[in-house]
Image (cartoon, rainbow, N blue to C red):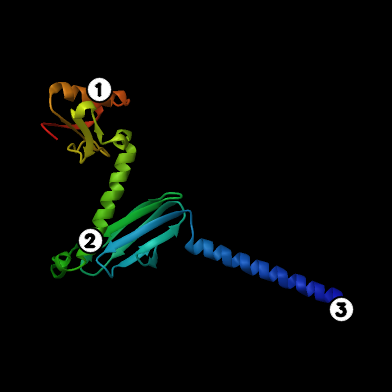
Amino acid sequence: MIRQVKLLLIFLVLIICVAGISALLFLDNSNTSGNAKLDILVAPSGSQLKLDGKNIKSGIRSVAAGEHTVSVSKGGFAGQEEKIEAIKDQSVFVGIILKSNSPQTANWYKSNDINLVQSINNQLYDQSSKKVVKSNPLATKLPYIGPGLNYRIDYGASTSGSKTNQVGIYIRYRTDQDKQAALDWIKSQGVDPSSLDIVYLQGNF
């Protein structure tokens, strides 16, 4: 009888331990892990930052894939809120720079947080560039230099505000024949040149 009681107690202790470990893992997963990441950086430094209504600090946060709300506020600056789509198995950079709404902070960024603002702008530009290149398959094959070094095709900033999510395709050439050869190469890649924002630059390169 005593032996059975001991076995029963051991069994109950094991169940409690397993249940406790499972609960801890569940809480850890629900609070700190997810299948997507948000890399959040805001300016000015010391701003109040919230993710889905909860106070957080700048940095990388593991979240569930889907839409999340990031809000930033600080005295002397206009608050800002953004809806961010977190992507499964990817890290999305979220950079927010608040604008001054007070004479006391009108020149804030001239003497404060200069490096922080530069870092945010650089990362936003890099992320935007990657999205644009990904949506324009031709850009992944550039730069391309034609046979005989007669022309070069590259990409850069778009010059057309009417074409959203578009890169500018820059064709540098020497002669009209070289220019046509460049266009023919673009066609050979399965891309219609008329669908592109092309900038022609004649001369040496």
Horizontally, residue 69 falls left or right of residue 105, namely right
Q: Mark 2: which amino acid? A: Val
Q: Position of residue 135 (x, y in %)?
A: 33, 38
Q: Secondary structure at mark 2?
A: helix
* In the image, residue 162 above or below residue 77: above
Q: Nearer the viewer, mark 3 or mark 1?
A: 1
Q: Nearer the viewer, residue 166 or 174?
A: 174
Residue 167 sits in which quadrant? top left
Q: Nearer the viewer, residue 73 or 62?
A: 62
Using the image, tell me which numbered label, if any, was put on residue 105. Answer: none
Q: Secondary structure at mark 3?
A: helix
- Quadrant including the C terminus: top left
Between the residue at mark 1 and the residue at mark 2, the CA separation in whole angstroms equals 43 Å
Q: Please report the residue visible at 23 percent of the width from the left and 28 percent of the height from the top.
A: 146
Q: Secondary structure at mark 1?
A: helix
- Quadrant including the N terminus: bottom right
Residue with the mark numbered 3: 2
Residue 12 sits in which quadrant? bottom right
Disc 2 crowd rating (10 Å Cα; few below 14, some 14-19, many 20+) is many
Q: Position of residue 59 (x, y in %)?
A: 36, 63
Disc 3 crowd rating (10 Å Cα; few below 14, some 14-19, many 20+) is few
Residue with the mark numbered 2: 117
Q: Position of residue 51 (x, y in %)?
A: 38, 61
Between the residue at mark 3 and the residue at mark 2, the CA separation in whole angstroms equals 71 Å
Q: Please report the residue visible at 25 percent of the width from the left and 38 percent of the height from the top.
A: 164
Q: Nearer the viewer, residue 137 or 176?
A: 176
Q: Mark 1: which amino acid? A: Asp
Mark 3 and mark 2 residues within 8 Å of each other at the beta carbon: no
Using the image, tell me which numbered label, if any, was put on residue 184. Answer: 1
Which callout, 3 or 1, points at the residue further toward the start of the chain? 3
Which callout, 1 or 2, points at the residue further toward the start of the chain? 2
